[in-house]
Image: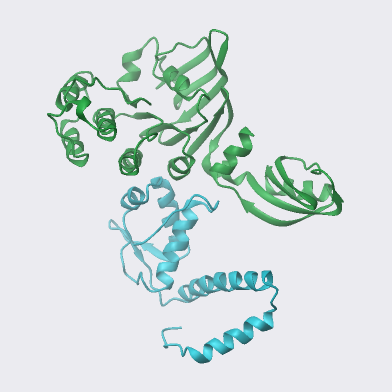
Amino acid sequence: MSNFVIDIKNLCRSFGEKEVLHDVSLAIPEGGVFGLIGSNGAGKTTLIKHILGSHYAQSGSVSVFGFDPVREPVQVLSKIGYMSEDRDVPSWMRVQEIIDFTKSFYAKWDSSYAEDLIHLFELNPKQRIRTMSRGQAARVCLLVALAHRPQLLILDEPSSGLDPIIRRDILSAIVRTTAEDGRTVFFSSHLLDEVERLADRVAILHQGRILFHDTLDSLLASFRRVTLRFTESHASAPDLAGSLMCRGQDREWTYVHRGDREQLVQAAENANAQIVVEHSLNLDDVFVSCVH
Amino acid sequence: MQIQIQTQGGVPIYLQVMQQIKYLVASGRLQTGDELPSIRALAEELIVNPNTIARAYRELELEGVVEKRRTSGTFVADSGSPLARKERLKVLKQRVDHLLIETYQMGFELDDVVKLLQQSAIGSKPTKKGS
């Protein structure tokens, strides 16, 4: 068994002609918060469905807690709390019925924690899902994902389409879950502010490929926006080793540079230019530069 | 404790937490012996990763701004130390740096700022408070 909670190797997946995941490898250590970033249609949900065992690996392998989620679903799913993107729960059920129904699947269901969450989320156990607001229904989904105190909490776009108050509930639940020793949170999002606040590690998924996977700190440290002043005027952007994007005119050009600082200084020197302004980037800028 | 986190500026979140706690200490809104919120409580309030808060507290402890007490929490360290003065100076220096940048951007010189400062100083007699 590996030391990783999730260990995906060279995973490829196509639906018909369309390749949705291409050679995805992703090893996520135990503990902490992992943020999967990607635009709509990048393949985030498809990747999550492989972790849950709803899709088998066409090529490559998926291992969760050391088990193949397709062959040994009980070993895997009993340790996972999952909230899907559509947050689908049977609309005809009452809150209490959903709780009783879900409880029967989990040996480790914590009834007193479930009670606490009912109060915290101000849910009425007798209310039917179909009469609830979108936000209240999302809280029910979150409750059933959390109440068995899963070792791995997977949230697919947990706050998309929800108002700020419910977003806060969901994000606090991530904070609380990770504050408990050894638990791991995996969440996908295109809201980069959230990811930057919560994630220890991030991966960028773009058109089915992992462009980057590292700690958030190293990701942010390896990008900078830098303005160079060249000795001569240039009509188009002068080449700079390691640069991703460039804008400017005449003698001053602003680049997004990826690499360490010494490489940047060297590249600027080689290009006969002087660094005049230098800024670090936030996750939003990094994402835009990477998928540009 | 009033702390605000922004993710637009590219400043790492642990640094924002550190700077704001230092500022609160330097401005006297947090005083020697005051207890800081627990890592978990602050993480939940600000919606940030608990490890980030832990890192900020750890670095503040290394710099002597706060101290951990056995079994209990994290407290503001003795602000009478020279370090507290150094921190206050640092906050002041940041303001001065901003002022100078604006000065040059608007086409003024250092002398203009010095004159302005002296003129303003006559108008506002400082209330003497710990140096």
Q: Residue furthest left?
A: A126
Q: Is residue A202 above or below residue B100?
A: above
Total numbered labels = 0
Please tell me which residue lies in front, A74 or B115: B115
Q: Is residue A170 above or below residue A74?
A: below
Q: Is residue A195 above or below residue A228?
A: above
Q: Residue furthest top?
A: A16
Which residue is depicted at the point 51% across and 22% down?
A43
Which residue is depicted at the point 25% across and 33% down?
A133
Relative side of A161 to B93, left or right: left
Relative side of A95 to A238, left or right: left
Viewport quadrant of the N terminus of chain B:
bottom left
Where on the picture, by quarter, is residue A60?
top right
The reply to whether residue A64 is in sight is yes
Please tell me which residue lies in front, A220 or A29: A220
Chain whose colour in the figure is green: A
Relative side of B80 to B96, left or right: left
Which residue is depicted at the point 70% across and 78% down?
B109
Which residue is depicted at the point 61% across and 33% down?
A291
Chain B drawing hue: cyan
Query: Looking at the picture, how far across and down is residue A173, in whole percent?
Result: 31, 39
The reply to whether residue A109 is in sight is no
Query: Looking at the picture, how far across and down is residue A281, in whole percent?
Result: 59, 48
Query: Looking at the picture, how far across and down is residue B83, in whole percent?
Result: 48, 73
Query: Looking at the picture, how far across and down is residue B46, in whole percent?
Result: 37, 51
